[in-house]
Amino acid sequence: MIRALTAAALLASIALAASADEVWSLPSGNQIVYERDAGATAILSYKPEVGLEAGYIFVPGLGGYYSGRGAYQGYWVEAADAGPVCAASLVDAEGKTWQRWGIAEVKFQKPDFPSKITLKRGDCFGSAKQKITAKPVVGAGIQ
């Protein structure tokens, strides 16, 4: 009985870990990767067009949800070497302070992976205007 419960728990944790390994391809060829959750906030990473460090998109309400997805509002952050900085700093869901950030809107075109996502972003306190669509990467290629 204990062996069966241990096996079931192990299989469940493997399924959850696999769900978090989602990747989307941007038109630039860079990728967005579902990195991890910080409580109810999902943390997605990407390589900015400028700068050396990864950028991140924090999506409150998405953390732990791998199906039944819709539209979310969050924020993006990048290192100061990626471009102009904001007049005010932002502290992210993990406690790190950023000077380059803005509003992010993330919309899944289907409720489950694989799904394209549409991203809009604005700089600092500005509304989200820049729009881009990312396609899911599945198996050996992009869907």
Image (spheres, grey):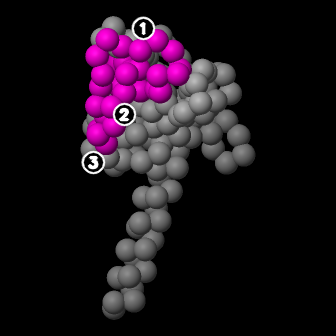
Q: Alpha-carbon distance for marks 2 and 1?
A: 17 Å
First reached walking from the N terminus: tag 1 or tag 3: 3
* Residue 137, position as x, y percentages in the image: 62, 39
Q: Which residue is mark 2?
A: 58
Write the residue at 72% across / 46% down. 140
Whether residue 66 can be seen here: yes
Write the residue at 39% across / 89% down. 3
Residue 90 lies in magenta, yes or no? yes
Whether residue 68 can be seen here: no
Q: Residues within 10 Å of mark 3 (few under 14, many from 20)?
A: few
First reached walking from the N terminus: tag 2 or tag 1: 2
Amino acid type, label 1: Lys
Q: Which residue is mark 1?
A: 129
Amino acid type, label 2: Phe
* Residue 124, position as x, y percentages in the image: 35, 13
Question: Could you tell me which quadrant the N terminus lies in?
Answer: bottom left
Query: Nearer the viewer's eye, disc 2 or disc 1?
Result: 2
Q: Residues within 10 Å of mark 2 (few under 14, many from 20)?
A: many
Please give the range of residues in magenta. 75-103
* Residue 56, position as x, y percentages in the image: 45, 33
Q: Secondary structure at mark 2?
A: strand
Amino acid type, label 3: Gly
Q: Which residue is mark 3?
A: 39
Q: Alpha-carbon distance for marks 3 and 2?
A: 11 Å
Q: Alpha-carbon distance for marks 1 and 3?
A: 28 Å
Write the residue at 37% across / 22% down. 99
Looking at the image, residue 95 sits to the left or right of residue 99; the answer is left
Which of 19 and 98 lies nearest the eye of the viewer?
A: 98
Q: Residues within 10 Å of mark 1 (few under 14, many from 20)?
A: some
